[in-house]
Image (cartoon, helix red, strand yellow):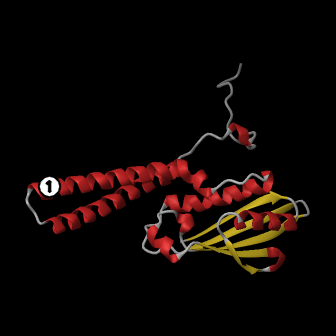
Amino acid sequence: MNAEFAFRTPGPMASAREGAALFFSGNGYSQVDDGGPTSLTYVRGSRWQRILSLRTEEWPTTLRVLLIEVSDEETGIMLRYEVRSGFHLVGALDKATLEVEAALLEDYLVTGRRRLIADAIAPVRRPVLIATILNMLIAVAVVTWIGVMGNFPLPWVAVAAAGVAFLDGVVIMAFADLILEGTQRTPRLRDPAAGPQVSGSPRPGPSGPE
């Protein structure tokens, strides 16, 4: 899975580079290359976590941070992710996790406030995981009950229960992913805290001459 995000931050390039280095070094990354004043390269995660974990931020990841001097008082930052997801089904939740991390970096460079990506993405991720686990447990219980009542061999019942639970989990996660992707594409009102509306946007007014 590849993803790319870009934004601008106030301050000279040297300050932005230092801030980005502090942010990523405190979020599970290890620096592998110092590309000079305009780039940084980091790695995170492991092959075992790719197998054992459902969290995108724990999978093997290579991140390249590019810095562009816009002016003496503003710096452009581009994040290029290369995530080795293995056999995981990559969807909107995984891409949203990386986007959240980019947003946390943007906030950190402005405010100095550090937040963990797991805490920031939890309101979206937690309901998906809970729904998936509950449905898998229900599937195991139903298949086991049917197998016991039908006097099927227990080893085959266990295999069938595991298979049905896995498929049920995949379906639930795919369904939740579709909902999340649809929500992201739904038009929303602007956040009042984000500032005034852009010029040319429609505003309520009288429907006719007074």
Residue 3 visible within the image: yes
* Residue picked out by circle 1: 146
Side (left or right) of 140 relative to 132: left
**Outermost residue toward the left?**
151
* Residue 197 shows in the view: no
Q: Is residue 21 left or right of residue 14?
A: left
Q: What residue appears at the point 71 percent right and 67 percent down from the top-left corner? A: 25
* Image quadrant assignment for residue 15: bottom right
* Residue at 70% in and 64% down: 26
Position of 56 relative to 62 (above/below):
above
Relative to 49, is 157 on the left or the right?
left
Q: Residue at x 75, y 39 (%)?
A: 196
Task: Check disc 1 and give the amino acid type.
Answer: Ile
Residue 114, position as x, y percentages in the image:
72, 54
Find residue 191 and report its horizontal and vertical position in percent. Answer: 67, 40
* Rendered residue at 45%/56% (across/down): 177
Is disc 1 surrounded by few (<14), some (14 to 19) or many (20+) residues within 10 Å? few
Against 205, residue 125 (above or below) is below
Which residue lies most toward the front here? 154
